[in-house]
Amino acid sequence: MTPMKTDLRQALSSGRLILTAECVPPRSGGAEAVGKLSSMLPANLDAVVVADNPDEIHGSALACGALLAREGREVVLSLSTRDRNRIALESDALGAAALGIGAILCLSGNHQSLGVCPQAASANDIDSIQLTQAVKRLEGAELLAGAVAHPYQRPLELNLLRLRKKIAAGADFLLTEPVFDVAAFTPWMEAVRAAGLHERTAIIVSVFPFASVEQAESLRQRQTYGPVDEAVVTQLSKSSDAGKEGIAMAARIAGQLKAVPGVRGIHILCGGSEAVAGDVIAAAALA
């Protein structure tokens, strides 16, 4: 599948619905494996967000992003402050720009004790807000900067304060943690609109298609991203094909989210199953 030539900067200023999806770098297989991942992703994405060791050790996000950019993909490279000091972070961002990558997603990263590599030491030299500011100040790079928003963190006042800091640091877009319940997401979005923050940055809301009952139950217990209702697990367990049901659930949520005022785009967290992005887009009639 040949990707459509896209320009994320142009898409962000267009006012239309933005579509992005996650790509998890393969652990092995070289350039061919990355090419296979690219072929599994829809051609009509505005950008592919390359994950940076979110759950375990994978191949280099920078290398994967460069290979995807070479194929014509618009790439957002995730960089985690957990694993690099400010020197390495800025160096990788400059390298990304030189390799045709136009945007950086600035992350703190999940704590390594949650499964990435429990015995590893973290860097945490700067935080994600400082990284956002650093990316925007890199001379000659002209990179877009993205940050992460957490719709379920409370109290809401502190949540919005952190959002304001990310926007003030230069965040051109915000990717939310996955939304599993639109009703629970609505108060946060109403507060964002009331504060006018949706006019200062693009809010791109994430959905997560569950691949199995076990995955949903694990996320429900750990609350890795946010609250997962027990009814979701029950619904998946009653289905004869939990994977298909997970895609259908994510599509229904995406369809509701795109109608919420202030939402500028939908991001599909593939969890290493890149082919589901196209299924969600088709089922939700997002394209």
Image (cartoon, helix red, strand yellow):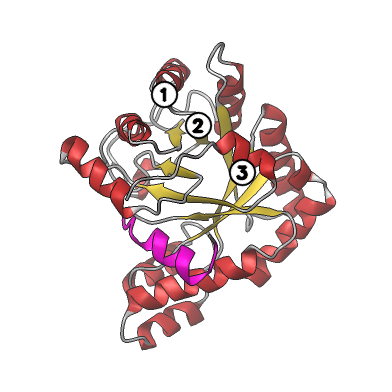
Give residue 92's quadrant in the image: top left
Disc 3 crowd rating (10 Å Cα; few below 14, some 14-19, many 20+) is many
Q: Residue 12, how many percent across, how many down?
A: 64, 41
What stretch of residues is rendered in magenta?
Answer: 272-286
What secondary structure is marked by label 3?
A: strand
Work out how far the residue at label 3 is from the one at label 2, CA to CA, in angstroms.
11 Å
Work out how far the residue at label 2 is from the one at label 1, CA to CA, in angstroms.
8 Å
Q: Residue at x 64, y 62 (%)?
A: 258
What secondary structure is marked by label 1?
A: helix
One can see residue 134 in this view: yes
Front residue (pair 186, 84):
186
Pointer 3 or 2: first along the chain: 2
Pointer 2 with pointer 1, Cβ within 8 A: yes
Front residue (pair 52, 259):
259
Q: Is residue 79 above or below residue 177?
A: above
Q: Residue 159, how many percent across, how many down?
A: 69, 48
The residue under label 3 is: 174
The residue under label 2 is: 104
Work out how far the residue at label 1 is from the one at label 3, CA to CA, in angstroms.
20 Å
Q: Residue at x 38, y 36 (%)?
A: 72
Callout 2 amino acid: Ile
